[in-house]
Image: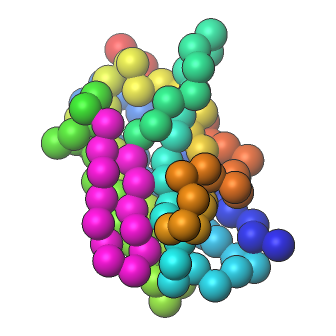
Amino acid sequence: QVRLVESGGGLVQTGGSLRLSCAASGGTFSRYVMGWFRQAPGKEREFVTRITLSSGSTVYADSVKGRFTISRDNAKNTVYLQMNSLKPEDTAIYYCAARTIFTPDYSYWGQGTQVTVSS
């Protein structure tokens, strides 16, 4: 059973930085895509970024391009989300998710970590 555990959330001021981590276990991840999603209060969950673990190929939502960077450490089965120049509108619960490269649907989700950006 694949398990995803996020960490690294917290409270930061506008313009600050945070790094989230997502540790994966229980699977063989060479053919997986790992993604980050977020959900703000009263809003639907939205895609933030993803990375293909084998190639390192990345995709970002327009709202975070140039500010957020996703990376991976395949030896540790861990994905990171470096968030810089944070804005109040980045406040949300951030979720790590995983899927295989053969399906567009994310099958596995972490419990989420709260990120709060104060103005």
Q: Quadrant of residue 48?
A: top left
Q: Is residue 58 magenta?
A: yes
Who is closer to the viewer here, 83 or 47? 47
Residue 20 seen in the current view? yes
Q: Quadrant of residue 117?
A: top left
Instruction: Name the residue at 30% across, 59% down.
Output: 58
Residue 11 screen position, x and y as percent? 50, 33
Q: Residue furthest bottom?
A: 75
Q: Which residues are magenta?
A: 49-61
Q: Is residue 85 left or right of residue 13?
A: left
Q: Could you tell me which quadrant the C terminus lies in?
A: top left
Who is closer to the viewer here, 3 or 107? 107
Residue 102 screen position, x and y as percent? 54, 67
Residue 44 screen position, x and y as percent? 59, 20
Q: In the rendered view, would you say 86 is above or below 111?
A: above
Q: Is residue 64 left or right of residue 52?
A: left
Instruction: Name the residue at 57% across, 80% down.
Output: 29
Q: Is residue 48 left or right of residue 45?
A: left
